[in-house]
């Protein structure tokens, strides 16, 4: 199979796709550097995990689970495809191509070196040309070390509207949809566009030394200065994410909520104002201490080690209480959170309310069997009762609807509040009575527990494959838009899918 592929790449007659573009070149392939870059996916040494158009793949890109075969290069599309055979599996067709050097005699070192050098030079030149056309600074010697401009930007004077798509780089809709929702969170976008992140880069503890935050800032700048309904390529962000986490380095499908949680953590690391690592200290109980003071000690312990704009806007605090059913001993914990993963109650085929999901999330739960908790009073594991409340509310609340199990995806319709998601009944008494636990309360005439919907990540498909899109409220125009990778179209709250909504972004009413 690999010999046939190699012969195809050296065929003397060029081939064209439906758009009239050459996708397989003749014997002069190695001589024409620009065409080498354009057709680099046909060369034997493709990046691991990259898609190939030689073999058919299956796709699921609509609500039903019917699958159709895609015939290869004659069907160019930016639709995401479910995973096929592992690219590095030597028994799969893709693995035979990727591991061709292991199966047959490779090209001579001279011929192979010349091809790689010409291809590398061309790829760098082509990417530089594309990046310059999109307004990205690619030559670090000509650009400031930290920022993409030489002075702070006045966000109000930006000509763009943020109505910009993100091109699919190969099964990256999970990333594109999450980034679109983040782009439409005003408190985050204004922070990056005003370049405040440039002076808060953590270049000592962060895995990327701040490169990911800087790249994300450049991407947002491109998105918010581009002409409406155009698109840009998130190449730099994708590469850096793959360097931080190998599971995101290829072109396989991933869960958008898992990516979002990883991405926020990575941005937090890049922007953590705590430059030096502080050893963890166990939080000891103080007899007779109030729950409020205890929660504040837990929060300070977290803040002493984690302090960033991401923490300021996205991080809240949970109040967990566990009561031993044997001796009645009570233990509490106050853990930080970046999102809430809430269950979807089963209600036949009827639509459930968001409050039903939150009611089940905060309902009293019995922990028994393998879920037994250790009781410090009984000195052994015991059955216990657990309850959860919201102790501290974030400015941006991310809610993850748990649609996926080990066996299926739940298509239950969830009625999503648009203007008034009120969380007061789910908060602890301390949260309701202490302004420090309510973002914006100190500047508002009244305590607010109300949130407004700002973005939705949608998943269409099944447990085994599908496609992600985003519906977002553009805070500059006050209109809703649907972001389907590079495509952007007008939409409305009436068109938000209650069965496909997967990750919800809410912003506090009095801080929007």
Image (spheres, rainbow, N blue to C red):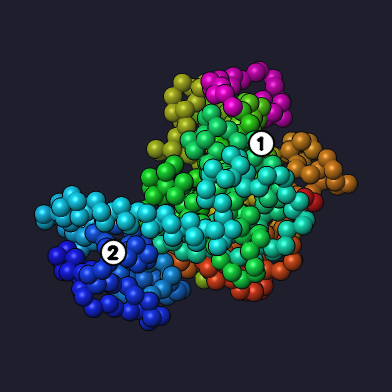
Look at the numbered disc 1 and give the secondary structure of its residue: helix
Residue 20 belongs to magenta span: no
Asked if the stretch drawn in magenta spans residue 290, the answer is yes
Residue 403 place in picture, x, y as percent: 48, 59
Residue 477 on image: x %, y %: 74, 66
**Which label was assigned to residue 110?**
none
Residue 70 picture location, percent across and down: 32, 75
Measured in 3D between alpha carbons, the distance from the residue under mark 2 to the one under mark 1, in whole angstroms, is 46 Å
Circle 1 crowding by C-alpha within 10 Å: few under 14, some 14–19, many from 20: few
Q: Residue at x 53, y 20 (%)?
A: 279
Instruction: Provide the residue designation for mark 1.
Output: 199
Of the pair 399 and 24, the residue shown nearer to us: 24
Q: Residue at x 61, y 74 (%)?
A: 489
Residue at the far front: name it. Answer: 31
Q: For mark 2, what is the residue? A: 31
Q: Magenta part of the protein: which range?
A: 275-297
The one of 87 and 212 positioned closer to us in this rendering: 212
């Amino acid at each position: 199979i690999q010999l046939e592929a190699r012969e195809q790449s050296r065929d003397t007659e060029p081939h064209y796709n439906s758009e009239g573009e050459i996708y397989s070149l003749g014997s002069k392939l190695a001589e024409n550097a620009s065409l080498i870059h354009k057709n680099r996916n046909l060369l034997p040494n493709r990046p691991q995990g990259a898609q190939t158009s030689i073999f058919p793949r299956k796709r699921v890109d609509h609500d039903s689970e019917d699958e159709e075969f895609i015939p290869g290069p004659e069907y160019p599309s930016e639709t995401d495809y479910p995973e096929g055979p592992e690219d590095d599996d030597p028994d799969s067709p893709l693995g035979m191509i990727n591991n061709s050097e292991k199966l047959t005699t490779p090209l001579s070192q001279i011929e192979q070196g010349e091809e790689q050098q010409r291809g590398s030079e061309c790829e760098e030149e082509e990417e530089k040309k594309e990046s310059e056309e999109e307004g990205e600074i690619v030559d670090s010697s000509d650009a400031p070390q930290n920022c993409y401009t030489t002075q702070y930007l006045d966000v109000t004077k930006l000509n763009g509207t943020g109505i910009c798509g993100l091109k699919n780089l190969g099964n990256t809709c999970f990333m594109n949809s999450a980034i679109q929702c983040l782009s439409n969170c005003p408190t985050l976008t204004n922070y990056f566009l005003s370049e405040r992140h440039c002076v808060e880069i953590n270049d000592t503890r962060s895995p990327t030394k701040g490169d990911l935050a800087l790249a994300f800032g450049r991407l947002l700048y491109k998105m918010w200065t581009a002409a409406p309904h155009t698109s840009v390529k998130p190449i730099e962000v994708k590469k850096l994410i793959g360097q931080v986490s190998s599971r995101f380095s290829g072109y396989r499908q991933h869960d958008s909520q898992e990516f979002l949680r990883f991405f926020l953590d990575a941005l937090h690391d890049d922007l953590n104002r705590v430059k030096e690592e502080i050893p963890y200290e166990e939080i000891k109980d103080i007899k007779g201490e109030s729950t409020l003071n205890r929660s504040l000690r837990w929060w300070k312990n977290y803040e002493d080690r984690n302090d960033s704009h991401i923490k300021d806007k996205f991080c809240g605090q949970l109040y967990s209480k566990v009561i031993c059913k044997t001796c009645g001993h009570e233990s509490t914990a106050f853990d930080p959170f970046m999102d809430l993963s809430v269950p979807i109650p089963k209600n036949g085929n009827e639509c459930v309310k968001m409050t039903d999901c939150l009611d089940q999330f905060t309902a009293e739960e019995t922990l028994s069997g393998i879920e037994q908790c250790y009781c410090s009073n009984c000195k052994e594991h015991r059955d216990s009762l657990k309850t959860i409340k919201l102790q501290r509310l974030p400015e941006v609340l991310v809610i993850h609807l748990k649609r996926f199990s080990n066996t299926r995806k739940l298509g239950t319709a969830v009625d999503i509040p648009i203007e008034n998601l009120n969380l007061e009944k789910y908060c602890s008494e301390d949260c309701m009575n202490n302004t420090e636990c309510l973002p914006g309360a100190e500047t508002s005439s009244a305590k607010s527990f109300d949130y407004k919907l700002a973005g939705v990540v949608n998943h269409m498909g099944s447990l085994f494959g599908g496609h992600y899109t985003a519906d977002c409220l553009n805070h500059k125009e006050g209109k809703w838009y649907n972001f389907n990778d590079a495509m952007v179209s007008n939409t409305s709250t009436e068109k938000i899918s209650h069965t496909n909504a997967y990750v919800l972004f809410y912003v506090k009413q009095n801080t929007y």
